[in-house]
Image (cartoon, helix red, strand yellow):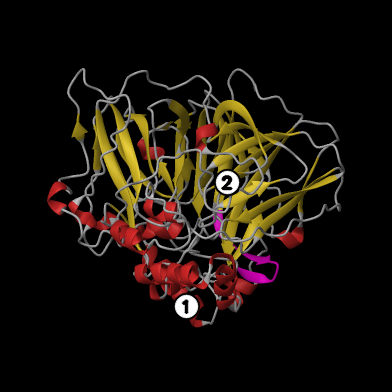
Amino acid sequence: MLIPSLLPAAGLLPRRRFLQAMTALGSTAALPAWAQALPAARTGTPPELRGPHFELTMDYTSVDFDGRRGIATTLNGSLPGPTLRMREGETVTIRVTNRLRETASIHWHGVILPFQMDGVPGISFAGIAPGETFTYRFTLEQSGTYWYHSHSGMQELTGIYGALIVEPRGGETIRAARDQVVLLSDWTGDDPMRALAKLKAEAHVYNQNNPTLVKLLRDARQHGMKAALAERDMWNAMRMSPTDLADLSSRVLSYLINGQASGANWTALFKPGERVRLRCINGAGNTFYDLRIPGLKLTVVQQDGQNVEPVTVDEFRIGPGQTCDVVVQPREDAYTLFAQSMDRTGAAIGTLAVREGLKAPVPVLDAVQWLSMADMMGGMDHGAHGGEGDASAAMMNHGSMDHSSMGHGAMNHGLADGNRPARASAQVRHARTEWGPGSDMRVDMPRANLDDPGVGLRNNGRRVLTLADLHTIGGPMDPRGAEREIELHLTGNMERYTWSIDGQRFADSKPVHFKYGERLRVILHNDTMMTHPMHLHGMWQELESPEGKFLARLHTIPVQPAQRLSFLVTADALGRWVWHCHLMFHMDLGMFREVVVS
């Protein structure tokens, strides 16, 4: 997907004119004549292609998701695109032909490769012009479950994505009789650019859980009218909503499993007693999913393509960009695969069954949980009800603090040789650029609780996977400690619907520089109310605990509101890379950085 400064070079304007023409028709449901003649996309379990040579073609197709019709951009006519199976150690060649009316691209998410093959227009290459074919060629240095997607415009949100599986060179160590890809995604019933324009005009336009009079009366019965009114006053004073968990909702999204809406009931087959490996991938442009299979325990065996020490849970949250492999052992005839959206406005629903046509009971959506004061203020959690007005005002930090002690550059805190700290710095450093219109809150006392499953999953009676549960087998890839620290703050302004890093959009920023071969620590500090799945291209992010203990090797790390976490990275990949939030609109609006390793 693209960023504003790259639009002309990448040829996005023709696409925008095309979408504007579509919008002028009223909606994508009112398809023009040429679009009505498009072939229907193939959905459901996609075809599987095996390497080392692959041919992919992008083109337009029509889709209909439980009555939401539209034009999709697809690969080989399939949504998701074909599942690509490769083998570790192979040199693969992938020819991608673009038959769209706009520049396109493919990024191989989580795959370590030369930066020229990374597929980010304007950074690693020029993009694939209409009518052209680009040849990707790289050698696989890893195994595991990954995925691929467009990095141009909104093509990921309109269908260009698929699973990528790299089989281990020495054979699979995760034992399973069956292997199923569960690719979650979402589909806008509206033109994505039109949805974005609505968010810019009114940031809460799709929020279906805004506080109501009924909720106020219920809270008054539980906590007293004074406390209930005080809580409303607090949120109103901050001009924020406690239910702002997702930008988009079921009002404009269909939730999909392998390209099928719930009405299609995508089904994976098994024989009772078999061990079934589910390769869960979140290819959504906007949606965090909370996935569970009632009646089954989920043994997590791999995260972001890396084998982890098995941990058994009832449920896990998976953000856009992440992958999570679980092993289940079903014994009944049918189970519901239930992936509810984080804002609880809908769910992607499928079935595991011994034969087609079966269904199991479908759970009701969980009740919406409000963001807590811990989500707003981090360590200053004074409870969820009553009396927080003064504290929240301090958290908002609109001029009450001594700025002279802050903002002297949030990055590149060099460390003297022999004085490498074993853990990340706890001192919060807000960059000067955070005191601008690009940031409407700053968290001064963040929380570092990696054992928190996040809003909506707390105290729900189920065992939920957390970041603290993840332990990559084999430990860190590099035994060295950090030579220096980089601190980046995830920022935004909800009223303006802007997203940035350190208060700066990508267009106003300078690249982050890594010295080739160095080992450094990166601190991600979330100064917003939303969870951001942060994805680094080309290198691994080795998540550590607050005590500095290695946890897991990840390509995408979700950072919760008011949370501060850190990871180590070895800068062993020369070239130009990117680092961004994997929520499509956040990235498109500026939560994006170029990273240069030189």
Residue 568 lies, with reference to residue 278, above or below; the image says above
Label 1 neighbourhood size at 10 Å, few (<14), some (14-19), many (20+)?
A: some
Residue 445 relative to residue 73: left or right: left
Nearer to us in this view, 225 or 324: 225
x and y percent of residue 574 in the render? 30, 31
First reached walking from the N terminus: tag 1 or tag 2: 1
- Look at 63% across and 66% down and name the residue there: 62
Relative to 143, does residue 462 appear above or below in the rendering? below
Question: 536 left or right of 254?
Answer: left
> Residue drawn 36% across and 61% down?
11
Q: Using the rendered view, name the quadrant where residue 344 is placed.
A: bottom right
In the image, residue 546 sits, relative to residue 434, either above or below, namely: above
Give the image quarter of residue 43: bottom right
- Secondary structure category for the residue under label 2: strand
- Give the number of the disc on residue 21: 1
Of residues 212 and 471, which is closer to you in this image?
212
Disc 1 element: helix
Q: Which residues are magenta?
A: 58-70
Depth check: give the residue in front, 17 or 418: 418
Q: Which residue is mark 2?
A: 317
Nearer the observer, 290 or 86: 290
Residue 473 visible:
yes
Amino acid, disc 1: Ala
Residue 368 colored magenta?
no
Q: Quadrant of the N terminus?
A: bottom left
Do the numbered discs 1 and 2 sit on residues whose CB atoms are within 8 Å?
no
Q: CA distance from mark 1 to mark 2?
A: 38 Å
Q: Residue furthest left?
A: 404
User: What amino acid is labelled 2 in the image?
Assistant: Arg
